[in-house]
Image: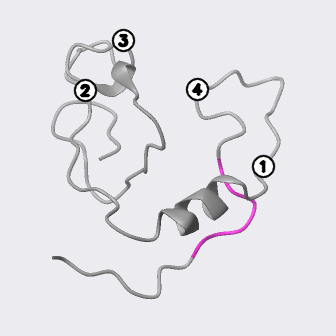
């Protein structure tokens, strides 16, 4: 779950394609070292995840050196169905 500080995760999430140790507890991504909550995994449809990964992103703004620079998709992705197993 995406978050800004402790107890702030609400509705935003991200899918990690590879290991991201900086997002783990004790990682360097957040100054509080608390990491991010992992709440699921892709059990089928990884081909779709890879297609999303290859989609065009909004170009980075050279005046704003943010950690998310160049990571937002130009067009939104609509989830037509999600289910719990």
Q: Residues within 10 Å of mark 4 (few under 14, many from 20)?
A: few
11 in relation to 16, above or below: below
In the rendered structure, does residue 61 fall within the stretch colored magenta? no
- Could you tell me residue 3's position as x and y percent? 32, 39
At 22% across and 13% down in the image, what residue appears? 26
* SS label for mark 1: loop
Q: Residues within 10 Å of mark 2 (few under 14, many from 20)?
A: many
Q: Is residue 76 magenta?
A: yes
Q: Between residues 49 and 37, which one lies in front from this camera angle? A: 49
Q: Which tag, 3 or 1, sits closer to the chain's start?
A: 3
Disc 3 crowd rating (10 Å Cα; few below 14, some 14-19, many 20+) is: some
Residue shown at 44% from the left, 43% from the top: 16
Q: Name which quarter of the figure residue 29 lies in.
A: top left
Q: Which residue is mark 2?
A: 35
- Quarter holding residue 50: bottom right
Question: Toward which corner of the image does residue 37 lie, by quadrant?
Answer: top left
* Number of numbered markers: 4
Residue underneath mark 3: 28
For marks 1 and 2, give the CA distance: 26 Å
Q: Which residues are magenta?
A: 72-77
User: Disc 1 or 4, which lies upstream in sequence?
Assistant: 1
Q: Position of residue 55 (x, y in %)?
A: 73, 59
């Amino acid at each position: 779950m995406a978050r800004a500080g402790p107890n702030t995760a609400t509705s935003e999430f991200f899918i990690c394609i590879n290991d991201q140790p900086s997002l783990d507890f004790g990682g360097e991504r957040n100054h509080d070292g608390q990491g991010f909550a992992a709440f699921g995994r892709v059990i089928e449809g990884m081909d779709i995840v890879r297609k999303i990964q290859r989609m065009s992103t909004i170009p980075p703004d050279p005046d704003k050196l943010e950690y998310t620079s160049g990571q937002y998709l130009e067009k939104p992705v609509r989830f037509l169905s999600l289910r719990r197993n």
